[in-house]
């Protein structure tokens, strides 16, 4: 009998106990779009210039910069800041935030640099938020080749990413 009582007591000790928890309150706001891409800014094709593999000798080397301007037309009375977020669901290196292109070149990624000279990570928040001036604003970025490691094989590459207007 004592054995059964001890076994019952031990099994009750293994039952998980729960304490009262806090509350999660969520708020949000759905707004009508207030900024649109200017003509030609909704789809961009960037043809990077060919470079010599020797320009990417070490991890982190960057070469072949090409400017990309995205112009927004916004409601003049916007009254808040806007930014551009860049993303791709599958092809972003989680360690570097750079785009991992497809192709025959090896150890090369594509990096995005904002107009302040800072890396703009793919799948990250926008670096720059701007006020609209007279209902328009332009975001200038630079796309470039970036060595993930010393480039071991020259070749071609291609990648696609999306960009989205973000409101503050």
Image (spheres, helix red, strand yellow):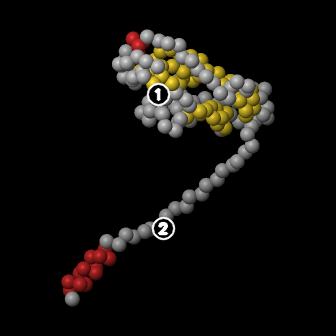
**Figure quadrant of residue 163:** top right
**Viewport quadrant of the C terminus:** top right
Mark 2 Cα-neighbour bin, 10 Å: few <14, some 14–19, many ≥20: few
As rendered, which of 27 and 35 lies closer to the eye? Answer: 35
**Residue 135 shows in the view:** yes
Q: Give the structural element (helix, strand or loop) at label 2.
A: loop
Q: Is residue 145 above or below residue 27?
A: above
Q: Give the structural element (helix, strand or loop) at label 1.
A: strand
Q: Is residue 28 above or below residue 159?
A: below
Identify the residue shown where x is 73% and y is 32%. Answer: 36
Q: Is residue 67 above or below residue 30?
A: above
Q: Position of residue 18 (x, y in %)?
A: 43, 68
Label whose residue precedes the other's in the sequence (1 or 2): 2
As rendered, which of 15 and 150 lies closer to the eye? Answer: 150
Q: Is residue 42 above or below residue 167?
A: above
In the image, which disc is placed on residue 102?
1
Nearest to the eye among marks 1 and 2: give it.
1
Alpha carbon distance from label 1 to label 2: 50 Å
> Do the CB atoms of the residues marked 1 and 2 lie less than 8 Å apart?
no
Q: Position of residue 6 (x, y in %)?
A: 23, 81
Mark 1 Cα-neighbour bin, 10 Å: few <14, some 14–19, many ≥20: some
The residue carrying mark 2 is 20
Q: Position of residue 55 (x, y in %)?
A: 42, 12
Identify the residue shown where x is 78% and y is 26%. Answer: 134
**Residue 115 shows in the view:** no
Identify the residue shown where x is 28% and y is 79%. Answer: 9
**Figure quadrant of residue 164:** top right
Identify the residue shown where x is 75% and y is 43%. Answer: 32
């Amino acid at each position: 009998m004592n054995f059964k009582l001890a076994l019952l007591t031990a099994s009750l000790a293994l039952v998980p106990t729960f304490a009262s928890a806090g509350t999660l309150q969520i708020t949000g706001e759905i707004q009508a779009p207030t900024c649109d891409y200017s003509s030609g800014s909704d789809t961009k094709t960037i043809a990077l210039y060919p470079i010599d593999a020797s320009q990417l000798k070490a991890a982190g080397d960057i070469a072949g910069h090409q400017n990309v301007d995205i112009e927004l037309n916004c409601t003049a009375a916007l009254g808040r800041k806007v930014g551009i977020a860049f993303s791709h669901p599958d092809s972003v290196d989680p360690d570097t935030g750079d785009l991992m292109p497809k192709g025959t070149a090896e150890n090369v990624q594509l990096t995005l640099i904002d107009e302040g000279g800072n890396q703009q990570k793919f799948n990250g928040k926008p670096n720059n938020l701007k006020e609209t001036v007279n209902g328009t604003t332009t975001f200038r970025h630079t796309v470039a080749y970036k060595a993930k490691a010393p480039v071991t094989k020259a070749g071609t590459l291609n990648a696609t990413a999306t960009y989205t207007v973000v409101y503050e």
